[in-house]
Amino acid sequence: MDDGMEQNSLIEIIEEQTNRALWEVRNVIDCVPDELWNKEYCGMPCWKHIYHMLHSLDLWYINPRDKNYEEPAVHEKDLNNLDVISDKQLLRGEIEDYFIRIEQKLRKYISGLTDEQLLEYPSNCEYCKFTLILAQFRHLHSHMGMIMGFIIDDTGLWPRVLGLENPFPAGKYDKYL
């Protein structure tokens, strides 16, 4: 079967699946109606669930023990913690800017990796690179499912996903299925 997806190395597969996951994250964020942005789910506003998901992706996909990791400009203590109520509120534009930063960072990181490096341990980290990447796919999609559930429950609309085989939409597209 020729689906156009390169599967000659683990990195090619990880890169393709990361690109698909990032497209879906952007689409789900775009699907959150303004009236749900601050609505509380499980005691936290929707935007905080999104920020938690993104912050984890930003910190844990590459190296959660990186001494040079820089928090995003919008961050303050526990803003990413779903167990702590925050006084600060993030705007959609702040989340979108943060997502773009993460997307660029992850694509640059992946483009420099080789299959052999996947079993290497980042500096000061007890997990190998492959473990960190897979753990973030697990965490990301747990939270994506929750956020999609919020959207579906409140709007009756299902955010579009790519799955394994659907092509990336070109130009304007319906963000819902």
Image (cartoon, rainbow, N blue to C red):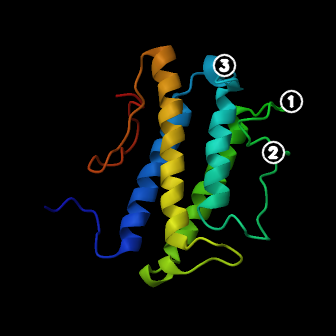
Relative to 95, 158 lies left or right: left
- Mark closest to the chain's N terminus, 1 or 2: 2
Say few, some or many: other residues with alpha carbon within 10 Å of mark 3 (under 14 / 14 to 19 / 20 or more).
few
Residue 39 is marked as 3
Q: Mark 1 belongs to which amino acid?
A: Asp
Report the residue at 65% width, 68% height from top.
Answer: 63
Q: CA distance from mark 3 to mark 2?
A: 20 Å
Q: Position of residue 33 (x, y in %)?
A: 57, 22
**Callout 1–callout 2 Cβ contact below 8 Å:** no
Badge 1 density bin: few <14, some 14–19, many ≥20, Cα 10 Å: few
Secondary element type, mark 2: loop
Q: Nearer the viewer, mark 3 or mark 2?
A: 3
Q: CA distance from mark 3 to mark 1?
A: 15 Å
Q: Nearer the viewer, mark 1 or mark 2?
A: 1
* CB under 8 Å between discs 3 and 1: no
Image coordinates of residue 171 in percent, x first then y, are 40, 42
Q: Which residue is mark 1?
A: 87
* Quadrant that contains the N terminus: bottom left
Q: Secondary structure at mark 1?
A: loop
> Quarter-wise, where is residue 36 in the image?
top right
Q: At 59% across and 61% down in the image, what residue appears? A: 61
Could you tell me residue 135's position as x and y percent? 52, 57
